[in-house]
Image (cartoon, rainbow, N blue to C red):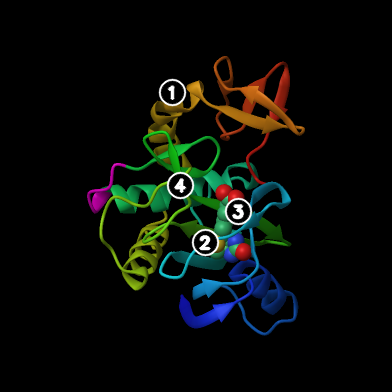
Amino acid sequence: MVVSFVESCPSTQEELIFMLKNAVITPPYALVASTQTNGVGSRGHSWQSDEGNLYFSFCINENDLANDVETASASIYFASLMGEFLKSCGSKLWIKWPNDFYLGDKKIGGVITTKIKSVYVCGMGINLKKSPSFANILDIDISVPNIVDGFINYLNLKISWKQIFSKYLIEFEKSRVFNTHIDGELTSLRDAILLNDGSIMIKDKKVYSLR
Ligand code: BTN
């Protein structure tokens, strides 16, 4: 995968989507910035974070993933790969449903994934050096290039969704004490049923993670 490092950009995610749509790049491709000025988060929120933290987006064709990764599962799949890599480096992070990086009860980062035709564009932000007081930072000392490199190595292993999901299923129990936004409403995950594609059934409604 070609990895491009830039000093600053409004949003690695928006930039990568633009480059993909305008055929400036072809997947697989990754863009990493030292800082972002107008980052995007999930559900249309902005993502503001400090210099020294991770701002990483990559795109990959669906055919280059393990063949049991469905669209509905992609964001959880990518978050889990990053989670597995960082745990292998000693971190105690975990993934709160659907794809937030947590340390204890505090968020340390998140993932957004968009699909453009057959290409996934995934963006990850992780607090490495600084965080707002309500959040936390990663519990291991690792450089941005090493995280990106380690993640790409995990991605290249083409680990099956089945294998990733078997671990995610166990970790999901930790999410039950949390609430999540469903149709703009804060809803408890206590009674949610995790389905095989990573979506949940909650109040008789199926809620997907690709968002
Ligand atoms: C979330 O809201 O939890 C997801 C945040 C994702 C932020 C990352 S930072 C790198 C990439 N570029 C963006 O503008 N957003 C994602």
Tell me the amino acid under the disc marked 2. Ser
The residue pinned by badge 3 equals 112
Identify the residue shown where x is 67% and y is 85%: 24
Residues at marks 1 and 3, CA–CA distance in whole angstroms: 22 Å
Q: Earlier in the sequence, mark 1 or mark 2?
A: 2
Instruction: Give the crowd class for mark 2: few <14, some 14-19, many >=20 residues within 10 Å.
Output: many
- The boundaries of the magenta stretch are 88-92
Give SS at disc 1.
Answer: helix
Ligand 1 neighbours mark 4 (CB distance < 8 Å): no
Q: Are marks 2 and 4 in contact (CB under 8 Å)?
A: no
Residue annotated with mark 4: 133
- How far is mark 2 from mark 4, CA to CA? 12 Å
Q: Position of residue 3 (x, y in %)?
A: 46, 78
Determine which residue is flagged by label 1: 173
Badge 1: residue crowd in 10 Å (few <14, some 14–19, many ≥20)? some
Label 2 C-beta lies within 8 Å of the nearest ligand 1 atom: yes
Of the two numbered discs 1 and 4 on the same chain, state the one appearing first in sequence: 4
C-alpha distance separating marks 1 and 2: 28 Å
